[in-house]
Amino acid sequence: MVQVTLLLEPAVALFYTKVAENAGVPLEQVLSNALFRLAGELSLEALSTS
């Protein structure tokens, strides 16, 4: 597995921390899921415009 460091604005960090707390999962998992979903959405958008 590759380790990645993300720098987040304080408001963004607070938002995702609250999401993680409410979901009962680690912050890293919430960020991973959000980035994975964004990658999928961007891929679909790229396919539809080509």
Image (tube, grey):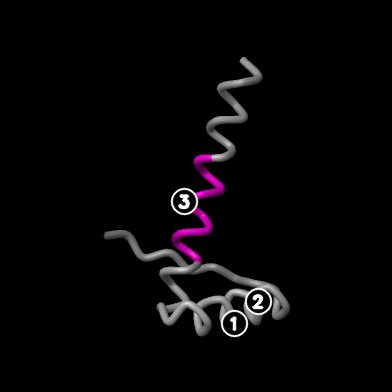
Mark 3: few, some, or many residues within 10 Å (few <14, many ≥20)? Answer: few
Residues at discs 3 and 1 in contact (Cβ within 8 Å): no
Front position among marks 3 and 1: 1
Magenta span includes 44: no
Spatial CA span between label 3 and label 1: 19 Å
Secondary structure of residue under mark 1: helix
Residues at discs 3 and 2 in contact (Cβ within 8 Å): no
Q: Looking at the picture, which amino acid does disc 1 mark?
A: Lys
Task: Provide the residue designation for mark 1.
Answer: 18
Residues at discs 1 and 2 in contact (Cβ within 8 Å): yes
Q: Looking at the picture, which amino acid does disc 2 mark?
A: Phe
Task: Provide the residue designation for mark 2.
Answer: 15
Q: Looking at the picture, which amino acid does disc 3 mark?
A: Phe
Spatial CA span between label 3 and label 2: 18 Å
Secondary structure of residue under mark 2: helix
Task: Provide the residue designation for mark 3.
Answer: 36
- Nearer to the camera, 32 or 18: 18
